[in-house]
Image (cartoon, grey):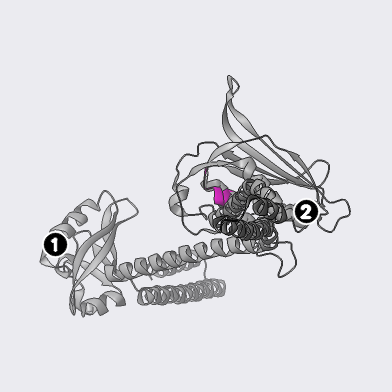
Amino acid sequence: MARLSTDVMTKTDQVTDAALPRTGEDAWLSVIQKMDEAYADLVDYQVQVEEQNVELEESRTFFDGVLAAMSDVLIACDHEGRIQQVNRACEELTGKTGAMLAGESIVTLVAEVSRPVLKDCMNRVRHEAIRDQELMLTGADGPVPMALNCSPRFNKRGRLIGVVVAGRPLGELQKAFKELNEAHAELKVAQERLVQAEKMASLGRLVAGVAHELNNPISFVYGNMHALQRYTRRLVQYFDTVQSGASRDALRQMREELRIDKAIADLDSLVEGTLEGADRVREIVNDLKQFSSTQRSEKLPYDLVHVAQSALHWILKEHPKVQVERDLPDQLMGQGHAGQIHQVVVNLVQNAVDAIRYQDDARLTIRAGSLPASAASPEQCDMLWLEVADNGAGISEQDQAHVFDPFFTTKPPGQGTGLGLSISYGIVREHGGTLTIQNGEQGGAIARLELPVQPVASDAESRGIYGQS
């Protein structure tokens, strides 16, 4: 309004100044013209003032709505700590209206035990922001534990003019943390179940090969036991005849008829064959127990070549048409969870076989070796590596970035869970190694596994198999 008065006075002076040198009708016309111009300016200024009032009212309504919608306590104070404004959450918590709190010291809102803490915060906030300061607020129903944040307010000259205090009841924070911990625990359980489900799915794909593998030694043992049973009956009949006091001629004739000499000669080979078959059954069962076990055992020595041969042997039982080229040393000893490494190799071989199983020239190549710790000491092995290559169509460019994503699969529905490579990646990372899958220069895909001979314990073990992001 002061601006409007000044403008009006200016216009009036202009009218007066313009009218002085004139007389008669021209002077009056000039005065009227100047007054019309001044009135038009007054109207423009009035319109601008009304528009600014509307904008100011809208801003105030928006600000009041934000304050009312906040669930956290908000208190605005002056530089001496006197309350200027509070939001609805503060009114509901304290049981006092904003008008009742206006002018009071903010220290009166906290319990006696917390007042020294709040006073210290009000002094420190002049130089630094206060974050998550715990104290007791005096609520309408009793003391309420709060976590307060204090921030200073400055004017255009940088002078402290007040403090803004925001707080949240610790009960809500504790509840939120509890829900977060429960969700995290449920996620870990779900991850463990997914890992075990994928392992059982891999194990299920090997059932036919395992059944055949077990059938051979068991059939061998079964046949040997039948032969031992027949020999036992002959020996019992012969020794009974000996005990009855039969003559030497009768015993010699009976010995020839029952073929006792042949039975005695076969006993050693039958027993050795039976033991060999039983040992083979025990090895297969131990491999299965180790592969399907849900327990996290300590890391022990294992032979990567044996693991690779076992995985090939089991899977290729179902795919006899796949040609296999092996370039494997006699032994590659590492340390880790043999069952988990076996699961990784099984997944790599199974994926390679699935990519070429319907080709007429299906060919699989598996190689392994070791990398020296340094060029200066080539005799010291630091890393073990294994590659599984196929002559299939390879991996498309758009799928290349997603091969290790959980539940990503290019197989038809019902033929893959999309978890095999993701879990394998986690297992290898837990062992301190790397797993990569790329297209070969001559076609097909190449999966390369690298594992340290002596894996170093890392945080991945405490996080579980899904330690990657």
Main secondary structure of the magenta stretch = helix
Q: Is residue 11 left or right of residue 398?
A: left
- Residue drawn at x 27%, y 54% is 160
x, y percent for residue 23: 52, 70
Instruction: Give the residue number, with chain letter if any, for mark 2.
Output: 396
Q: Amino acid at mark 1?
A: Arg
Q: Amino acid at mark 2?
A: Ser
Residue 115 numbered tag:
1
In-front residue for pair 60/11: 60
Q: Is residue 21 visible?
A: no
x, y percent for residue 297: 45, 51
Q: Is residue 215 left or right of residue 27?
A: right
User: Around disc 1, counting alpha carbons within 10 Å, would you say few (fewer than 14), some (14 to 19), or many (20 or more)?
Assistant: some
User: Around disc 2, counting alpha carbons within 10 Å, would you say few (fewer than 14), some (14 to 19), or many (20 or more)?
Assistant: few
Q: Is residue 129 above or below residue 378?
A: below
Disc on the earlier residue, 2 or 1: 1
Q: CA distance from mark 2 to mark 1?
A: 67 Å
In-front residue for pair 100/215: 215
Which span of residues is magenta-colored? 336-341
The image quarter in which residue 449 lies? top right
> Circle 2 sits in a helix, a strand or a loop, which is it?
loop
- Residue drawn at x 58%, y 34% is 383
> Circle 1 sits in a helix, a strand or a loop, which is it?
helix
Q: Is residue 438 left or right of residue 467?
A: right
